[in-house]
Amino acid sequence: MGHIVGYDAGTSEQWVGWTAGASEEAEEFVRGLGLDAALEPGYLQAVADLEQILVDGHSLAGGLWYPDPADLPWGQFTLTYLYPEAGTAFDPAALLKRVRKAEKIRGTRLLDHSTALGDVDAGQVLMEVEVRGFKDTGVVLSRIAATVFPTGADEAMRLEFQTNVPTAFEALSGEALTIVQSLTVEVA
């Protein structure tokens, strides 16, 4: 088997994306959007918050979704490599067994959870959808995770999309599917 040596995850013009550690480029992009002066600080804070998530999660890249430039970002995504653990089965079917049942998280209520296996051009994919309400804040967080097992690679790639704008979930689902289906991976 080989290793992932490159990838490209195409996003629409409604996304500002960057590799972990390069948030200055994202900040420059945000400043160039010509946002209302009242929105720019929120966008810059969203970039800083996502950069921290990327660093803390050892992620490769991420992005903010802004379908309406007259509003703050509606969602985000992270892209992370997954590596097999010694002695553990590392394939879509084994991962499906582990995530088929949603994790219990104290202080939340699980509103929806589903999983499905499929194929994209890059290889096999495990899709997970989870909608969870947080009791203390009333926030509803919708998450779509796609774990792609590139053909011929030892590693997998996890793209995780989320929004706390309930009315945006359907549109984010479409964005997520488009990005996952357009993913190209170079394996050597």
Image (tube, rainbow, N blue to C red):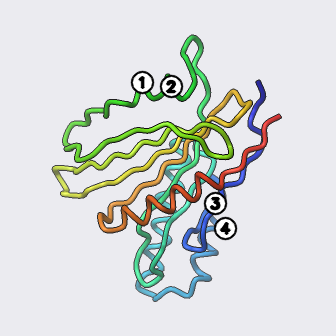
Looking at the image, residue 136 lies above or below residue 35: above
The residue that disc 1 covers is: 97
Q: Amino acid at mark 1?
A: Lys
| Disc 2 from disc 3: Cα separation | 31 Å
Residue at disc 3, secondary structure: strand
- Tell me the CA gap for discs 4 and 3: 7 Å
**Real-space Cα separation, disc 2 to disc 1, in angstroms:** 6 Å
Secondary structure found at label 1: helix
Instruction: In this rendered view, identify the residue nearer to me: 50 or 84.
Output: 84
Say which residue appears at 78% left-offset and 28% top-offset.
2
Residue identifier under label 4: 25
The residue pinned by badge 2 equals 93
Q: Which image quarter is the N terminus in?
A: top right
Determine contact: label 4, label 2, CB under 8 Å. Answer: no
Q: Amino acid at mark 4?
A: Glu
Residue wearing tag 3: 18
Is residue 72 found left or right of 177 in the rendered image? left
Q: Quadrant of the C terminus?
A: top right
Give me the C-alpha separation between circle 4 and circle 2: 38 Å
State the SS at label 2: helix
Residue shown at 46% from the left, 65% from the top: 46
Question: Could you say which is closer to the camera, residue 67 or residue 37?
Answer: 67
Q: Earlier in the sequence, mark 4 or mark 2?
A: 4
Going from the N terminus, do you reach mark 4 or mark 1 first? 4
Q: Position of residue 168 (x, y in %)?
A: 36, 67
Crowding around mark 1 (Cα neighbors within 10 Å: few <14, some 14 to 19, many 20+) is few
- Residues marked 4 and 3 touching at CB (< 8 Å): yes
In front: mark 4 or mark 2?
Answer: 2
